[in-house]
Image: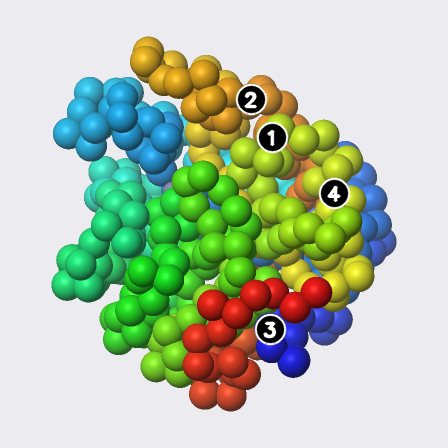
Amino acid sequence: MTAIDPTVQRREDDPAPQRQGPAFMPETAATPAPAAVAPGVLNAFTVDVEDYYQVQAFADVISPEAWSRWPGRVEAATDRFLLMLKTAGVTGTFFVLGCIAARYPALIRRIAEAGHEIASHGWAHVRVWRQSPEEFRADVRRTKGVLEDLSGTRVTGYRAASFSIDGRSFWAYRILREEGHSYSSSIYPIRHDHYGMVNAPRTAFLPGGPDGVVELPMTTVERFGHRWPCSGGGYFRLFPYALSRAAMRRVNRADGMPCIFYTHPWEIDPDQPRPAGLSRKTRFRHYVNLSRTAGRIDRLLRDFGWDRMDRVFAGPIGAAAEGTLPGGTGTATQPPSE
Ligand SMILES: [Zn+2]
């Protein structure tokens, strides 16, 4: 763990998203926004833009070659996110698959025109540790190029498919930097059957050394001697909203850290087609509480302060670029300090 927590970004000089009183409420808010649960801390709201048939858990049932046979739903669901964010007066970060951008170019322009950060989720959702360094570089370059052409913005953020950067693929951080990225949000420091790196630090660090980009790990909360996931996704749908809110509040208040929340367009689309042949576990994880998720996210947007990844984490991103971020020798193999 780093001695100095570089992920803390208090932006008292930027009152708009904190919503501490009526003066800062967005005019279009449907309901009055309560005072932020943790005033002064801005969290990162992120959407991984991919379609329901592209998730890793479906790979045994729907191969990438069969993707084109499934009806696309990502555009409508992403537009719904854009409306929810606009209503709440929030900007966030959209990690977009390159193949989705190529298929829905107008969608990418709409996301960027709304003021959100466009970032890379790789081309076609291939996990990093399955790629050679050469394949990874080509994938990163192709995706970044398409996203920048469509959005007219610089793309500096990267999130690996299925949080698939781990000890097998720390070479990726150097390639990301060489290709013009400045941060990654690709490690979930928990134990999970599909991903996770349980001993990784909870805060910004440099897994690839000083020549690589900074990793901004997905949020965890430490309670009762354990580390728990606290970053959205399936856990946010499974557990009651109040539990997620309490965990995030603890991270903001007790740890003084921003949270990273992630979700997907398919998580607010309960009417998506349901392919046959999925295991019971996959069906449960994918479909649990889909019809409640949009409402919960609406509440989340009003209960906390939010912004884009590149602004919430401007401190550690800048420090890593300047070579002043502590822990530049790859601290990922060290156990977390308790
Ligand atoms: Zn993904």
Residue 237, placed above or below residue 150:
above
> At label 2, which amino acid type do we have?
Val
The residue lying at 47 percent from left, 50 percent from top is 196
Q: Give the amino acid at mark 4.
A: Arg
- Looking at the image, is mark 4 or mark 2 earlier in the sequence? 4
Foreground mark, 1 or 3, reads 3
Evaluate whether residue 301 shows in this view: yes
Residue annotated with mark 1: 237
Residue 14: percent from the left, percent from the top?
Answer: 69, 68
Which residue has dot 2 on it?
A: 288
Between disc 1 and disc 2, whose residue precedes? 1
Q: Secondary structure at mark 2?
A: loop
Q: CA distance from mark 1 to mark 2?
A: 6 Å
Label 4: which residue? 245
Task: Count neighbours of disc 2 (C-alpha within 10 A) and say few if under 14, some if 14 to 19, many if 20 or more.
Answer: some
Mark 3 vs ligand 1: CB under 8 Å? Answer: no
Distance between mark 4 and mark 2 Cα atoms: 19 Å
Residue type, numbered disc 3? Met
SS at circle 3: loop
Residue at numbered disc 3: 1
Task: Report helix, strand or loop for mark 1.
Answer: helix
Residue 37: mark in rendering: none
Give the Cα separation between the discs numbered 1 and 3: 30 Å
